[in-house]
């Protein structure tokens, strides 16, 4: 969410029961403005909050030039000191999928995923679970740092849930993606259609998918995957 509209955006999510108080909102907004200035970011957004046992993680992201390929993620446990989110590795993605324990709130914590997998294996009848065959207790390759787990979790959530309205981003001839300054929002009719919303991620579908399904196709606007192509369908 845009930091300039953070209070309004949080009010729209008040039905969920998870909110930031006024003090946290003020601290968060000021901290993100400082973070944006120190890192020379063109825009910065508040991604959300991941709850932990000891501390919660506050996630933010921004970009310098490219609004799609240049996204940079940051995290903090106190809304004051921010750390750069590490690059997600293939091993971190694999171990994160197996890890089911709650976040502790300590980025330096080392998690032995083999113990977590063994605990789950003992609670099911199928002892030959395919997911646990590759995990051996005590193997150093099964140690997962909570900071890496946090990065992999944020990536997984963003890939599936981050969406933008069609027309909000514009792809230049040189391939860079920028904010469309002429975008004034969707009409009421467009807002009711799933094809009016696009995934904020690198395209995974073939580039001709939108070309074959949209009569008003515009490559500068329709370069992202449409939500209406998701399986299962979201209503």
Image (cartoon, rainbow, N blue to C red):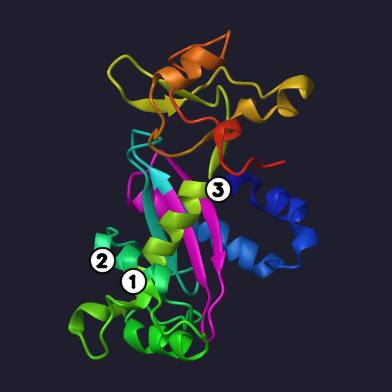
- Residues under labels 1 and 2: Cα distance? 6 Å
Check if residue 41 falls in the magenta segment.
Answer: yes
Is residue 134 toward the left or the right of residue 76 in the image?
A: left
Residue 55: image location, x then y, percent: 51, 81
Asked if 156 appears above or below 214 in the picture, the reply is below
Q: Look at the image and tell me in which quarter the C terminus lies.
A: top right
The quadrant holding residue 149 is: bottom left
Residue 123: image location, x then y, percent: 52, 89
The numbered disc on residue 95 is: 1
Q: Residue at x 27, y 81 (%)?
A: 143
Residue 91 image label: 2
135 shown above or below 226: below
Q: Earlier in the sequence, mark 1 or mark 3?
A: 1
Q: Which residue occupies 56% across, 32% down?
A: 229
Q: Secondary structure at mark 3?
A: helix
Tell me the residue that label 3 is attached to: 161
> Which residue, as the protein is rendered here, is positioned at the far left?
140
Q: Position of residue 127 (x, y in %)?
A: 42, 85
- The residues tagged by marks 2 and 3 sit, at their Cα atoms, a distance apart of 22 Å
Q: Residue at x 66, y 30 (%)?
A: 194
> Is the C-beta separation of discs 2 and 3 under 8 Å?
no
Q: Do the numbered discs 1 and 2 sit on residues whose CB atoms are within 8 Å?
A: yes
What is the magenta range? 34-61
Label 2 residue SS: helix
Give the side of residue 67 with respect to residue 13, left or right.
left
Give the number of the mark in front: 1 or 3.
1
Q: In the drawing, does residue 85 fall left or right of residue 2? A: left
- The answer to whether residue 11 is above or below residue 221 is below
């Amino acid at each position: 969410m845009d930091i300039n509209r953070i209070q309004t955006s949080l009010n729209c999510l008040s039905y969920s029961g998870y909110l930031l108080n006024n003090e946290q909102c003020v601290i968060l907004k000021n901290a993100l403005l400082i973070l944006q200035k120190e890192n020379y970011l063109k825009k910065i957004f508040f991604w959300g909050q991941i709850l932990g046992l000891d501390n919660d993680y506050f996630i933010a992201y921004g970009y310098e030039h490219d609004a799609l390929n240049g996204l940079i993620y940051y995290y903090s446990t106190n809304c004051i000191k921010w750390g750069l989110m590490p690059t997600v590795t293939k091993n971190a993605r694999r171990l994160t999928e197996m890890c089911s324990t709650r976040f502790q709130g300590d980025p330096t914590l080392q998690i032995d995923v083999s113990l977590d997998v063994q605990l789950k294996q003992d609670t099911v009848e199928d002892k030959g679970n395919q997911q646990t065959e590759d995990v051996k207790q005590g193997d150093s390759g099964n140690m997962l740092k909570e900071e890496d787990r946090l990065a992999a979790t944020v990536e997984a959530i963003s890939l599936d849930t981050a969406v933008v309205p069609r027309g909000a981003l514009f792809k230049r001839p040189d391939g860079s993606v920028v904010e469309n300054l002429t975008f004034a929002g969707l009409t009421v009719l467009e807002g009711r259609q799933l094809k009016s919303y696009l995934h904020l991620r690198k395209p995974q579908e073939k580039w001709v998918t939108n070309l074959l399904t949209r009569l008003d196709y515009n490559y500068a606007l329709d370069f992202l995957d449409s939500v209406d192509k998701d399986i299962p369908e979201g209503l």
